[in-house]
Every structure is written in structure tokens, then in C-alpha cells.
Amino acid sequence: MATRGAYAKGVVKREEILEAALEIVGRLGYRSASVREIAEAVGLSPAGLLHYFGTKEQLLVEILRARDAHDTARFADLDFMPAFLEVLRHNAEVPGLVELYTRLAAETGDAEHPAHAFFLDRTRAVNAAAREVFVAAQKTGRIRADLDPDWIVRAGHALADGLQNAWILDPTVDMAADVAQFFALLRPVTPS
């Protein structure tokens, strides 16, 4: 029984850490947010905090996983394309999380990187969900049937990731507006 109680407390503490980390990294950024600052926010030492995650790198991966879970829950009532645009709009409010995502994504070409499996799994899941939406939209005539749905997914993914990089350099870039324009280009052309 004590183990279950200790496990439940550990799960709650881990969630508390991730909530604090989302706020701190989102506000301060990947480079400015420290393990010490996150640990202090939840009443732990840095070593105590890392006990829940193993390494700083694994903590960073779990922050991204928590970010995705929050975004999924926050926009769950929307269809895929409107939800995707809302996530991009929300990303502009949490620059540190965008910075964390882009930095870790760039490092995951190394199969040994702690974030490699996360990005691989995330990409597969997002791409599969997007492909399903695009194929269904093609069947109903909302998206051009002459476009390969796999190309749409790859191009959309590349556009979104590239826009995040561009936005980090120039925060006037409107990521959601550019992706909305891409979605508009997918619609069938109606004769005038």
C-alpha cells in the first residue's frame, strides 16, 4: 500500500514540476530557464527534481510532451486544421517553448539523442492524423483531389517547422496566417 501512495505522490509531483517548467521555459526560454529555477518553483533541489526525470535532457523532452498534451486538451473541440492554427497562435504566446522545440528538433538527427524517439513518435502520430483529415477532406471535395495527401502532410509539417524557425528570428512572422494561406491553397479552385 505504501508503494502505491508513494507512486501516486510521485506522479502528482512530476505533474507539478511539468506545470512549473511549462510556465518558466515558456516565459524565459530554453537557455535562460535553469533546472535550479524550476526546482525552486516546486520546492525541490536540482538533484531532487532530476530524480523524477533522470536527466535535464529527459526533463526537456517531458516538457514538450506536456506542452503537446496541453495543446491537445485545449483545442480538442476543434477540427484538425482550425486546431492546428490555434496551436500556432498559442505558440506565439510561449516563445521559450517554441525555442525549446526547435532546438531539440534540430538535435534529434542523432539517434542517440534523448529526444529522438519523442520526435519520431510525435511526427508519426501527427502525420497520420493529418493524413486522415486530408484524405477525408479530399473525398468530400474540400481539398483538391489531385494533390498527394502524403505531400500535403510533408509540406505542411515542413512549413510549420520552418515558420517556427523564422518566427524565432523575426517575431513579426505570423505563423498561423502563413499556414492558413497554405490550407487555402489546398482548396479546389471554383470556376468564376
Image: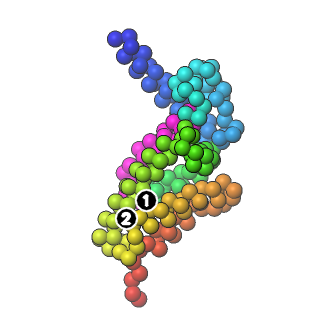
Taking the image as drawn, is residue 31 in sight? yes
The mark that comes first in sequence, 1 or 2, is: 1
User: In this figure, which residue is indicated by the disc labeled 2?
Assistant: 134
Please give left or right for residue 176 compared with residue 121 in the image. right
Measure how far apart labels 1 and 2 are at the Cα level: 13 Å
Main SS category, magenta section? helix
Name the one closer to the observer, 179 or 52. Answer: 52
Magenta span includes 70: yes
The residue type indicated by label 1 comes to: Pro
Residue most toward the left? 139
Name the one closer to the observer, 159 or 111. Answer: 111
**Label 1 environment density (alpha carbons within 10 Å; few <14, some 14–19, many ≥20):** some
Could you say which disc has been placed on residue 56 in the image? none
Indicate the position of residue 7 as horizontal and vertical percent values.
41, 19
**Pointer 1 and pointer 2: residues touching (CB < 8 Å)?**
no
In this picture, is 178 found above or below 21? below
Residue most toward the top? 2
Indicate the position of residue 148 as horizontal and vertical percent values.
40, 70
The residue type indicated by label 2 comes to: Phe
User: In this figure, which residue is indicated by the disc labeled 1?
Assistant: 82
Q: Which of the 4 image quadrants contains residue 174?
A: bottom right
Label 2 residue SS: helix
Q: How many marks?
A: 2
Q: Which residues are magenta?
A: 59-81
Quarter containing the N terminus: top left
Please give left or right for residue 175 compared with residue 126 in the image. right
Label 1 residue SS: helix
